[in-house]
Image (spheres, helix red, strand yellow):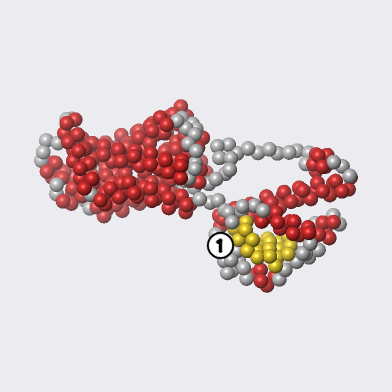
Amino acid sequence: MNLLRVRTLVTKEVSEALRDRLYLTLAFFLPILLMLVFTYGMTSNIDNVGVVIVDEDQTAASREYTQRFLSTRHFKQVEVTHAPTRADAALPAYQARLLIWVGSGFERQLQNGQTAKVSVQIDGAFTEPARTIGGYVEAINAQANQDLRQRYAAAQWGARSSLTRQVTHPVQLQTRYLYNPELRSVAMIAPALMMMILMMCPPLLIAVSVVREKESGSIYNIASSTVTRVEFLLGKLIPVVAIGMVNGFMLWALVAFWFDVPFRGHALSFTLALLLYVVATSSMGLLVSAAVKTQQAAIIITTMTAVIASMQFAGLFAPLETADPVNQFISHLFPAADFLRVIRGIYVRGAGVEVFWPEMLSMAAYGAIALTLAHTLFHKRTAT
């Protein structure tokens, strides 16, 4: 292998890329756009949910109970009424997604030590948000029940508030959420999207670059020259890997500063994992380009493979440990699952190479195998 020829090929690729505005757009603008669109679209935090309150009791106790919901950032008041017909029209008209119905006699039942019933209706058209809203409602209602029990015990026994708290709640559970104490979904979604975007953009760039030379016929000039297959593949691979590394650091900055997700890991661990992953995904693009003849086929195969591998078999939405054995096996055919575990561990939990070295070795092996297969297939295509 002649390094001078490799450098010449790399220089040629860079000069052609700088003259191609579409290539530059795909290389540097598309990853940022995808990160912004997907992160804002996939975050599951539920805030400012429209609430209609039907208060038939119209007492201080009913108002105090309903105010518990409105005092949080999760809910905002759309309407307060004692006319059920007006409230029934709120959810179908998409004016609200939650209805809280406090029946008459609410305060009297509480004062008599009886169970007061409250009806809650949630818009279930969107399943996951509906479950989240239901969880918020149950948590707020549980806190209201706790406060009411303490008040009742204090009123009945005349005890201090601290004593009544011990009587009504002899075991106090203290829960701490590590790494993501505010439970912001963006803290898990945004780093994971780096996996998906880098699974899509670098292989797309390199696949289109190689297949374009096939379509134009310029690749046969390479075949008839002294440039070897290894030199040609490295000349294509190195610029795309460099672009992928730049993209990775751009996405890192976007996640850290725009979405305010603190980076808890080590820069060297992140850089090493990023390099191995970009080489692996770029090698996948070389493999695709060696097997197809048209740019359309390269784009379709690369995009579909990236989307399926990153969204279905990487653990983006659910841990792979809960998947069936077939899906777990398929996940090992792509580097996305390994990088997702690494990036979440490094970025969010602050782990390092000493924890994720098996995943890094797996990504390195994937890149080596993909490059070897691309080398073999490229030889077969140019020989015909």
Side of 138 relative to 316 (left or right):
right
> Is 79 drawn above or below residue 212 in the view shown?
below
Residue extending farthest top:
354
In this rendering, would 215 be left or right of 340? left
Q: Quadrant of residue 252?
A: top left
The front one of 183 and 372 is 183
**Residue under circle 1?**
125
Vertical placement of residue 117 versus 30, above or below:
below
Residue at 78% x, 64% y is 57
- Residue 143 makes an appearance in the image: yes
**Residue that appears at 71% across and 71% down:** 83
The answer to whether residue 373 is left or right of residue 102 is left
Can you say which quadrant of the picture contains the C terminus?
top left
Give the quadrant of residue 87: bottom right
**Residue 373 in view (yes/no):** no
Is 11 in front, or is 330? 11
Q: Is residue 350 above or below residue 121?
A: above
- Looking at the rendered image, the quarter that the N terminus falls into is top left
| Residue 371 image point, x, y percent | 27, 37
Q: Position of residue 192 (x, y in %)?
A: 45, 43
Q: Label 1 amino acid?
A: Ala
| Residue at image coords 31%, 44% | 202
Q: Considering the numbered disc 1 on the image, is that residue within a helix, a strand or a loop? A: loop
Q: Residue furthest bottom?
A: 85
